[in-house]
């Protein structure tokens, strides 16, 4: 197991990384503003599950296989780019609904389990189809391990859980603040339309950025 000093240092670094602009926090920001903070938190939960997946891939050696294979890396990034392009298209064509009553607002905020799982799934796909995250974890996590303190794979999993906690705190805060701000915009059809256009542009830019990524 890593020492407490290593875990505290790693947690601080993870917080700073979560605060730095990137695809994941932009994804949370836009989805929360569009759909509300509850949807945003479901997306955050999905992103955190994706972090667990990347961490397990590093611990099991799968990340090294992807890093060493140009074909796997390309397939993964193209899948991610296609998914982001799909989200961009959906955001651009999203209908506008002005919520005029408190009851309508309440119905919007209450998520069914099916809807929550769907948005959580989007977060998982968003995270797992980004090969840069996998390569980053492969290079980043082992720096905080010490073979003399036991299983490196176990240490990597512990560090991944700490990183997930930091991501949850940062992304969850973004989801809440962005969602509350987005509620104001939902009262205006024009504001919603612009928000949908901005979301589509952000997703499209992220898709293009992912296509251009090199190992």
Image: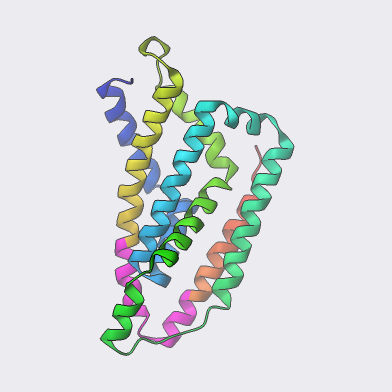
| Residue for point 32% across, 42% down | 165
Tell me residue 192's x, y (percent). 44, 80
> Which of the pair 155/33 is nearer the observer?
155
| Residue for point 61% across, 28% down | 64
Q: Is residue 10 above or below residue 96?
A: above
User: Could you say which quadrant of the image residue 67 lies in?
Assistant: top right
Q: How is the image coloured?
A: rainbow
Whether residue 2 is in magenta: the answer is no
Q: Is residue 36 above or below residue 174?
A: below
Write the start and end of the magenta stretch as one range: 176-195
User: Could you say which quadrant of the image residue 188 lies in?
Assistant: bottom left
Tell me residue 81's x, y (percent). 64, 55
Whether residue 184 is in magenta: the answer is yes
Tell me residue 91's x, y (percent). 54, 72
> Which of the pair 92/13 is nearer the observer?
92
The residue at the far top in this view is 148
Quadrant in the picture for the C terminus: top right
Whether residue 150 sits left or right of residue 208 in the image: it is left
| Residue for point 34% across, 58% down | 174
Tell me residue 128's x, y (percent). 54, 46
Quadrant in the picture for the N terminus: top left
| Residue for point 65% across, 47% down | 77
The residue at the far front in this view is 113
User: Could you say which quadrant of the image residue 155 lies in?
Assistant: top left
Q: Main secondary structure of the magenta part?
A: helix
Q: Is residue 207 above or below residue 153?
A: below
């Amino acid at each position: 197991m890593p020492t407490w000093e290593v875990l505290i240092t790693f947690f601080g670094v993870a917080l700073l990384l979560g605060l730095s602009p990137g695809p994941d926090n932009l994804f949370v920001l836009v989805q929360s503003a569009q759909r509300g903070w509850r949807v945003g938190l479901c997306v955050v939960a999905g992103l955190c599950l994706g972090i667990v997946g990347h961490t397990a891939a590093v611990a099991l050696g799968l990340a090294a296989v992807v890093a060493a294979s140009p074909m796997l890396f390309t397939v993964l990034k193209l899948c991610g780019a296609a998914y982001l392009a799909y989200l961009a298209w959906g955001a651009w064509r999203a209908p506008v609904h002005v919520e005029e009553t408190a009851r309508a607002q309440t119905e919007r905020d209450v998520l069914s389990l099916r809807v929550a799982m769907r948005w959580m799934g989007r977060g998982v796909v968003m995270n797992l189809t980004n090969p840069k995250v996998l390569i980053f974890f492969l290079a980043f996590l082992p720096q905080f391990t010490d073979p003399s303190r036991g299983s490196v794979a176990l240490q990597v999993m512990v560090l991944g859980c700490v990183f997930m906690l930091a991501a949850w705190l940062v992304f969850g805060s973004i989801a809440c603040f962005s969602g509350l701000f987005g509620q104001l915009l939902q009262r205006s059809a024009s504001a919603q339309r612009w928000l949908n256009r901005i979301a589509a542009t952000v997703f499209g830019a992220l898709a293009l950025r992912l296509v251009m990524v090199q190992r």
